[in-house]
Amino acid sequence: MIKLAIVEDVDEFRDNIKGYLDEQPEFKCVLSENSIESFLWKIKNSELPEIVLMDIELPGMSGIDGMKILKGKYPDVEILMLTVYADSRRIFEALCAGASGYLLKNSPFEELKSSIMELYNGGAPMSPQIAREVIGYFKPKPHNKKESALTDKEKEVVVGLVDGLSYQQIADRLFISVETIRSHIKNIYKKLHVHSKAEVIKKSLKDEI
Amino acid sequence: MIKLAIVEDVDEFRDNIKGYLDEQPEFKCVLSENSIESFLWKIKNSELPEIVLMDIELPGMSGIDGMKILKGKYPDVEILMLTVYADSRRIFEALCAGASGYLLKNSPFEELKSSIMELYNGGAPMSPQIAREVIGYFKPKPHNKKESALTDKEKEVVVGLVDGLSYQQIADRLFISVETIRSHIKNIYKKLHVHSKAEVIKKSLKDEI
DNA sequence: ATCAAATTACCATATTCGTGGGATTGATGA
DNA sequence: TCATCAATCCCACGAATATGGTAATTTGAT
């Protein structure tokens, strides 16, 4: 018997889901609320749900913020996001906030059920569209520039900068003069169109150099 | 009719898969090879497959390296990784190399079929275990430190540093004197035990401050 | 064999940074 | 109420950085 909670502001949709889930012998809805605020309030005196189905678009506190609070208080609760949107910003915000699964609302109830079971068994259910976004996150980027423009030596210098070394320290590490480092840095700055170590480090750590 | 290719070194397993897929009216196996090398050779004179089922553990060139080459020559080919391993290093290497799906070899053939269909329809099929790893990648880390120690103002200054601004520019942005920035920076350095902008930026971008 | 690029190195100079001292004002909490 | 801390500002000085030159080798590719 898996204990569930539902947080969804559209009354009809919430009741439909609850109706369906209550029919399933493997589930038990211990809470069904229309806002994060009331959910967080009621949960104090309720059985602790194992899985929370949560809408991402809620009046008042957003599902994302709600998740953060919920996860803070009850880290073991699994959260399955439900949403009509498949845009990547929302997806990654939700995942970074601790969602364990992400379904589109147009999923049929049977899929909702199997997704809950999958989540309960340690999986991470996602609608195909969502999975595509998530996988796409790792895909090799079209790599805007051609091979980063930087030479091998310049890349070594960049590594030194990222490691927080001074010019002198980089020189020692690469067994060349600090003057050479200065030359390389000048060229790196020109190529990357930056004017400080800080910007190089940022580029190196964020984009790709 | 979806055109498929199989790259798998274990003859029996490869033949079993091919046998099953050939029975399906939606599929057509245009290639079935036991190594990346022979696959890349034969594909030149073969119909171009739309989806390649590829083992990740291959003698000779690894599936990962093979994928990179394949993706380089035929960027539109979708790759579905097949493996017995679910360790995160392999998963993320494969995804970063351009895999569009990732199945464990213990998946039943029916699941393999539905996964191919899902991939063909723009999804990104994953075994539940794999999905868990992928989602886990985004999960909030156990956040080692206690609330980062930095005050709100100090965090704003850090943001300025990460943005590559000079002290003066940060001062202008926050409408306070550059001397105040210097004070904040001194305190930030003490709290984080660092001695340069570079280290702060690195900490901010890598760990969490 | 030749030319372009990469790597190495040096000089000069203005700016920025890192760090040591202070000091004042509020807000917060014990 | 008193102590603490965040936030604001100032001074000074040596170290490091940013940017402008110039130029000798090495290396790679044509």
Image (cartoon, coloured by chain):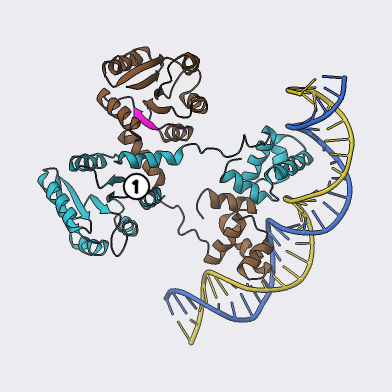
Chain colours: A brown, B cyan, C yellow, D blue
Q: Is residue A195 visible?
A: no
**What's under tag 1, amino acid-wise?**
Ala
**Residue A10 within the magenta-colored segment of the rendering:** no
- The location of residue A124, given as percent across then percent down, is 35, 35
Identify which residue is drawn at 26% across, 53% down.
B54
What is the x, y in percent for residue B199? 64, 50
For residue C24, which quarter of the picture?
top right
Q: Residues within 10 Å of mark 1 (few under 14, many from 20)?
A: some
In the rendered view of the protein, which quadrant contains the N terminus of chain A?
top left
Pointer 1 residue: B86
Above or below B13: residue A96: above
* Residue lying at 33% horizontally and 41% vertically, measured from the top left: B129
Q: Nearer the viewer, residue B7 or A91?
A: B7
Q: Label 1's element? A: loop
Residue at 20% from the left image edge and 53% from the top image edge: B5
- Residue A106: in magenta span: yes
- Dominant SS of magenta comes to loop
Q: Position of residue B80 (x, y in %)?
A: 27, 48
Q: Is residue A145 visible?
A: yes
Q: Chain of mark 1?
A: B
Question: Toward which corner of the image does residue B15 lie, by quadrant?
Answer: bottom left
Does residue A100 lie above or below A161 as drawn?
A: above
Q: Which residue range is magenta in the image? A: A98-107
**Total marks placed:** 1
Q: Position of residue A66 (x, y in %)?
A: 49, 23
Q: On the picture, is B54 further left or further right than A175? A: left
